[in-house]
Each structure stands twice: as C-alpha cells, then as structure tokens.
C-alpha cells in the first residue's frame, strides 16, 4: 500500500478527464447541431463541407441573379409591347392615308400623328431602364466596329472576328440634272377663229452663267413674244418684250404630282414651286446654287427608286434648264418631254476565309442582298449581318476629304456589350443576353412620310418589316425568359440536393449524439464515484499504523 502515489486515483482521474472531454465535445454538438465544430473533429470532412457550402451559397445567389434577369427581360418585353402597338397604329394610319379620298392637307394631319409616334418609339428606346441600365437603345447588344457604315446589326449566330468586303459600286438615287446652260428655244402656237389665224411665237435666249445658279438662270432668261395676225395682208405683227423670267408657261409632273408654271415667273418662285412639288412627289431637290446644276433625285436609293418627270413640252423642259440629251427618246429617236430614271443598288465583293487577299471570316456560301444603301449578308446556320452604307461610298469614289476610297469595309465583330447573367456558382457559368436596338433608325422607319407620292404604300412596306423586326426581338426575349425560368428551377433543385449532402457531413445526428451523451454522462458519474473510492484507499494505511 502506498500513500505518496495513489495510482488508483491517478488512473481513475485520467479516465474521468477523458470522459469529461468527450462529454464536452458531445454537449457542443448537441448545442450547435453540427457534427464538425473544429477542424480536428473531421479534417477531411471540414474541407469537403467548406467547398460544398461555397457552392450552396453561390447557387442561391445565382438563382436570385436568374430571377433578376427575368425581371430585366420582362421590363424590356413590356416596353416592346407598346412599341408593337405604336407600329400597328402607324400602319393603320398608312392604310388610311393611301385612300384616294384624302386630300394633301388630310395626309399632313395623318403624318403629324405618325411623326409623334416615331418620336415616342425613340423615347421609349432611350428611356426604358432597369437599375439605370438602358435596355432598348443597343447598349445591351454585342459591339461591332466598322468604317463607312451605320446601323450595324448582327444575329446571335455571327461569331466574333474580322469580316471584310469591298464595295465596287455605290448605291445611287434616280437622278435628273439640268445642264449648266441649255440651248435657246422657240415656241410657236396657233389660234384659229372665224376670220383669221393668229400665230404666236416666243423666242427665249438662255444665259451662259460662269457660276451656275438656278434662280439666276431663270431670272436672266430673256424672251420676246411675236403675235402675227394673218387677217391683214401683209400680216400685222406685234412684238412684246424683251422680258425676263421663265421663258414659257407649262406644267410638270414629278412622280405624278402636277404643278403649273406661268410664263415670266421669277427664279425664286419657280424654285419654290419645284421644291414643294418634289416634297409632295417623293423626290429631293438640290440647292439652287449647286454648281453641277439643279438636281432632282428620288427619295430612295437602289433599283426600286424611280423618278419620273413629265413636262408639258420639250420646250418647257428646256425652259427649266434640261437639255434634249437628258430627255427620253422613242424607238424612232424622237425626243419626248419626259425623263425616267432608275437608281442603282450597291455592289460589292465579300472576302471569304479561303481568300488570301485580306483576312476575313465570311463563309464561302455567304451572299448579300442590297436595298439601296441597306445591305444584308446571309450565310448558313442563321448567320445574318445588316448595315447601311454611307452615301456614295465605293471604290474609286472620293470621300468628304477629297481622297479616293479603296472601298474596303472592315467589320470587327466582338462579344463585348451583351448583358452577362451569372447563373452558376463558378467562374464562367454565365448566360449572354443580347437585346437589339429598337429605334426607328434600326427599324428603317425614321423617314416614313405618308404625305409624299407613294408614301403610304412605302410606309406600309417599311412598317411591315419593322413589325417583323420587333416581334423577332420579342421572340428572342421570350426564349431567354423561358431558359432562365428553367435555369432558376435547376439551380434551386441543385442547391436543395447539395444542402442535403452537406447536412450528412457536418450536421449532428441528434439521436445518436444523445445516446453518446447519455453513455458519457453515466461514465462521468461512475468515474466520480470511482475516484471517491480510490481516494479512500490511503486511509486503510492508518490501520497498519495503529
């Protein structure tokens, strides 16, 4: 028996301390609900649980991101619904304007509403926002950079990269231009009555101008009128003049829109009447001081652009400065008092990826369609690129700086600019959302005008295309929205399953832990009792000392 070292008490105390530590760990699990409270509890388990927890948190936020994306798309689609309604209304107004019962003034009133709706479409495109992000002005579309073109639009199936082409011929309007000076002309008219025949001859002399100016051309034209009365023998002649101004009276129809001119009208008056007639007839007129001569052009570009000028006589065409060479001729070569001209579509060469001249990714099956200056390039697998050429751009043509262009256009298509929705817990798990610009320019309806000749018919055609454009954008948004709906459901399901998995690793099984707690509690009590007994053993040594 020993009293200095009570080994029984030491052994019992060590066991009791171990039971206390285990009981403390079990009580911590019971109080926290976690099976792993310290890295020492389960080193590999805590590493696995940490990664899984980051995934769970990311999946929860990704689901929220997807829901925010749906809200963005619903905001854009709601605005496009109103744009669709406005286009439908403008088409209805165009049909109304096409009715022959409407006068010019009534078409002007119709145009006021159309112009107001066009402004509203652009306002909606510029002001539709989500969290200060503008949605419909092209800010959320992929960027494409190019020279000498505008209104660039690419489909989702156009890969990013470099595309090049060469414009070999520019898009042109139907054009008719006065000569810098026309030949002098004579007009003879006859009037018969019961007794005699009156002959009236007008002789006009056209000025030779060093610097052409249409108003001065008319004002400086001189004419004399000789009336010969054959009632007498010899006939009596009366000479009037010389006078200045328009040499003869006559009429002109510009694309079917008529206008009457009086003899002797000033250059200011004639130019103003021509300008107004061009506006109503769907044509454009150049400045009166254009050194190349007064030019009347079709409003549109391309092979569908027609310009028809019908003069009351060849002499009247000369009075306005048009030479005989500019007038039409019949099969026999006789000069007609008409001018019919047609525009020209742009022509180009697409450089393909097999071409060694320049770097370009157009496919060998790529084709283009031109509508005046508007160009659409198509290829397989939904490839579509559209744009508008700058006025007069082509190889061999001079630019605004006077330099001759090579006609090369280089497109740099990027994947920058689209809205990237983070719909996954990890890097790179994104969904790109592209929202095309829905402005009047990109829909090519910015210049719709039903007051012009054939304006209502042209407006209906353009508005039909615009309606298809908007419905196409809305369809794409609907596809995005449906995809995001499935995405958020998938993320929620994955988050649920991963939460269940991590629970099996780090959550405490309360029933099992409670059993362990009960066992350790009993052992603790037994240990305390055993230690008390062990501490009594040295007392037995006193009996030996008695």
Image: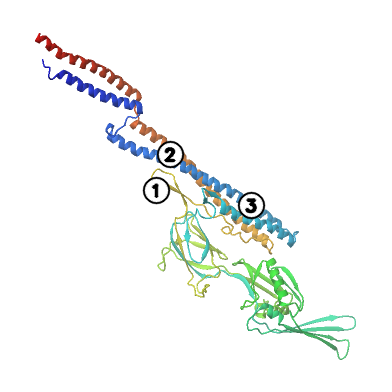
Residue in view at x 36 percent, y 34 percent: 502
Colour mapping? rainbow
The circle on residue 417 is none
Residue in view at x 56 percent, y 58 percent: 442
Q: Quadrant of the N terminus?
A: top left
The circle on residue 428 is 1
Nearer-N-terminus badge (1/2): 2
Q: Is residue 54 above or below residue 220?
A: above
Residue in view at x 67 percent, y 80 percent: 324
Left or right of 301 on screen, residue 1: left
Q: Secondary structure at mark 2?
A: helix
Residue 101 x/y as whole percent: 76, 59
Left or right of 520 on screen, residue 332: right
Residue 298 x/y as whole percent: 64, 68
366 or 536, nearer to the observer: 536
Q: Quadrant of residue 267?
A: bottom right
Residue 334 seen in this snapshot: no
Nearer-N-terminus badge (1/3): 3
Residue 312 x/y as whole percent: 74, 75
The circle on residue 60 is 2
């Amino acid at each position: 028996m020993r009293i200095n070292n009570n080994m029984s008490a030491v052994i019992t105390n060590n066991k009791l301390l171990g039971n206390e530590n285990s009981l403390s760990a079990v009580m911590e699990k019971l109080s926290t609900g976690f099976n792993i409270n310290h890295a020492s509890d389960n080193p590999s388990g805590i590493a696995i649980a940490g990664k899984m927890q980051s995934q769970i948190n990311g999946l929860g936020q990704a689901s929220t991101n997807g829901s925010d994306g749906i809200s963005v798309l619903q905001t854009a689609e709601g605005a496009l619904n109103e744009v669709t309604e406005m286009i439908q209304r403008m088409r209805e107004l165009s049909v109304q304007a096409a009715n022959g019962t409407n006068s010019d003034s009534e078409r002007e009133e119709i145009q006021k509403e159309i112009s107001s709706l066009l402004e509203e479409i652009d306002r909606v495109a510029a002001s539709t926002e989500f969290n200060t992000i503008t949605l419909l002005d092209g800010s959320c579309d992929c960027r494409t950079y190019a020279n000498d073109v505008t209104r660039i639009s690419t489909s989702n199936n156009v890969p990013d990269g470099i595309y090049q082409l060469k414009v070999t011929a520019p898009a042109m309007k139907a054009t008719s231009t006065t000569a810098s000076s026309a030949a002098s002309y004579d007009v003879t008219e006859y009037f018969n009555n019961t007794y005699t025949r009156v002959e009236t001859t007008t002789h006009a002399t056209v000025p030779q101008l060093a610097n052409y100016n249409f108003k001065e051309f008319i004002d400086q034209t001189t004419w004399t009128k000789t009336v010969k009365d054959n009632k007498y023998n010899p006939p009596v002649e009366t000479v009037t003049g010389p006078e200045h101004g328009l040499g003869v009276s006559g009429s002109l129809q510009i694309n079917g829109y008529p206008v009457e001119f009086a003899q002797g009208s000033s250059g200011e008056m004639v130019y103003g009447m021509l300008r107004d007639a061009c506006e109503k007839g769907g044509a454009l007129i150049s400045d009166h001081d254009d050194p190349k001569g007064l030019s009347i052009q079709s409003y549109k570009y391309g092979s569908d652009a027609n310009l028809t000028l019908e003069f009351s006589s060849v002499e009247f065409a000369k009075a306005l400065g048009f030479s005989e060479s500019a007038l039409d001729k019949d099969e026999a070569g006789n000069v007609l008092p008409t001018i019919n001209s047609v525009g020209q579509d742009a022509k180009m060469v697409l450089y393909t990826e097999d071409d060694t001249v320049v770097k370009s990714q157009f496919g060998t099956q790529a084709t283009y369609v031109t509508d005046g200056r508007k160009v659409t390039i198509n290829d397989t697998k939904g490839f579509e690129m559209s744009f508008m050429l700058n006025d007069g751009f082509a190889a061999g043509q001079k630019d605004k700086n006077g330099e001759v262009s090579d006609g090369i256009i280089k497109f740099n298509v990027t994947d920058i600019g689209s809205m990237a929705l983070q719909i996954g817990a990890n890097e790179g798990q994104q969904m790109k959302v592209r929202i095309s610009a829905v402005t009047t320019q990109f829909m090519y309806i910015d210049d719709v005008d039903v007051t012009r000749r054939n304006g209502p018919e042209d407006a209906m055609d353009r508005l039909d295309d615009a309606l298809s454009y908007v419905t196409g954008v809305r369809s794409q948004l609907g596809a995005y929205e449906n995809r995001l709906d499935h995405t958020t459901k998938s993320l929620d399901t994955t988050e649920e399953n991963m939460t269940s998995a991590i629970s099996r690793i780090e959550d405490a099984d309360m029933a099992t832990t409670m059993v362990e707690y009960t066992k350790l509690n009993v052992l603790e009590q037994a240990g305390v009792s055993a230690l008390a007994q062990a501490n009594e053993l040295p007392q037995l040594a006193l009996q030996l000392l008695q």
